[in-house]
Image (spheres, rainbow, N blue to C red):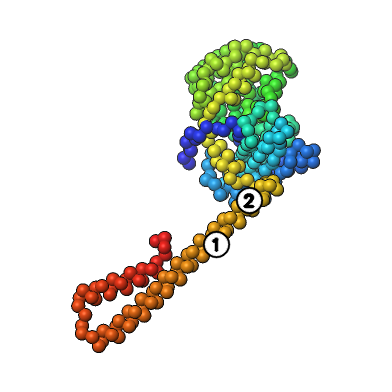
Amino acid sequence: MAKNSPSSIPAPDTAWLARGRHLGPEPERDVRRNLLALKAAGVIDDFLDLDPVEAARSTDMFPRDESADPGPTARRVFEARWRASGNVTVRAQLTTYEAESRAVGNDSEVAWVLAAEAERAWDASWPSPATMFWPDSDHIAWDHDRVAGGRLRSANHLPKDDGELRRLLRDCTRQSWFIHVVVHEAMTPDTLGRRPVTAFLPPSLRHRVIEHRATPEQALIADFAMKRELGVGLPRGGAVVLPLTPQAEGYDPERFTVNNVFLDGTEPTALLQKITEFASLPRPLPDGAEQALVRLRQGWHLLTPDEELVHARAMVTRYAEALRAMTASCDLYREAAESAHAALAEAGSGRSTAQALPPATAEQDSSALKTLTKTFSLFRRPDR
């Protein structure tokens, strides 16, 4: 299957996009329960749960990107609307798909794509769109990256095998929609040090970042693999924000490298600043994100009463225009039919007269034939 080329369209600063996997049973039930609870608590204004038939119809309306739609058909589409900072409307759409692994018997994995957009530039302090749909619980494994070996809200240790490590680094920078950070443990951390540094990030940024850990003995192999695959180094006891493909404008390895990260449970201020700065860089939309954003904007169902009124008025206007076009077309056909009948009558009259008159010249015959041909051409549709 051919891979789609990365989009050249820059990611809008109003959007929040994510793509991952849910590894537990009944993912749609988890979403539905969370939406019901948040609506009852007044956290979200409203939500919508489209059935499988409507979900498939909704996603089929737009060009499919196989890298974004891991399965052949959408399982469910959920929409939710809420207000951030009191008066900024946010619209979000979560689509679940049958994961590719189901073909080999893994019935507990479901892929998902989440696209959210606000009325103004996104603020990292706003609530995470992910937890508007998925329960913010460690017991529900909705937060796995499409790339195996990466999970949000967790410190993921790098593979021990050199080949697996390089493959992971390539996949994280080329296939993932998330920001990836690698932290080297200068020494084996205690319980507080094992806490992910991403837990200190603001809510909306927390669920956009995946943290990887290199153990103390992996210092050299991780540094070598990263330099060879990505052109960035990993300081001993430090951290680096990995580049993305296509690379964000303004990325420089030294700019996004921290030489010392103390994994003692305290807030790693320098590293958090680097992650926040990296997240603000302009970058092209990753593979499949453009389609998800188009579906959100053009395939939106959860309308407010005012939006319903505007939509109804627009439909009335379109129907009126279509009716006028049909009426005009009928008038044209009627005029053409009347002209054709008149021409036929005239042609018949001409044939009767021709029997009593001397034979017509070749020039006259040609003129009459042209007239009749021109008359019959009026039966053709105006747009042909």
Estimate the x, y position of residue 336 in percent, counting from the top left: 41, 70
Q: Residues within 10 Å of mark 2 (few under 14, many from 20)?
A: few
Marks 1 and 2, Cα distance to the nearest angstrom? Answer: 18 Å
Q: Residue at x 73, y 30 (%)?
A: 138
Q: Is residue 365 left or right of residue 155?
A: left
Residue at the outermost bottom position: 356
Q: Residue at x 61, y 33 (%)?
A: 14
* Observer able to see residue 27: no
Q: Is residue 124 positioned above or below 25 on the image?
A: above
Name the element at disc 2: helix
Residue 74 or residue 319, whichever sits in front: 319
Residue 323 has which mark? 1
Residue 274 or residue 124, whichever sits in front: 124
Q: Quadrant of residue 205?
A: top right
Estimate the x, y position of residue 236 in percent, counting from the top left: 59, 12
Name the element at disc 1: helix
Estimate the x, y position of residue 222 in percent, counting from the top left: 56, 18
Q: Is residue 191 positioned above or below 115 on the image?
A: above
Please state which amino acid type lies under the numbered disc 1: Leu
Q: Is residue 238 left or right of residue 304?
A: left
Q: Quadrant of residue 265?
A: top right
Residue 94 or residue 153, whichever sits in front: 94
Query: Which residue carries the number 2 mark?
Result: 311
Please state which amino acid type lies under the numbered disc 2: His
Q: Residue at x 39, y 74 (%)?
A: 340
Estimate the x, y position of residue 151 in percent, counting from the top left: 65, 29
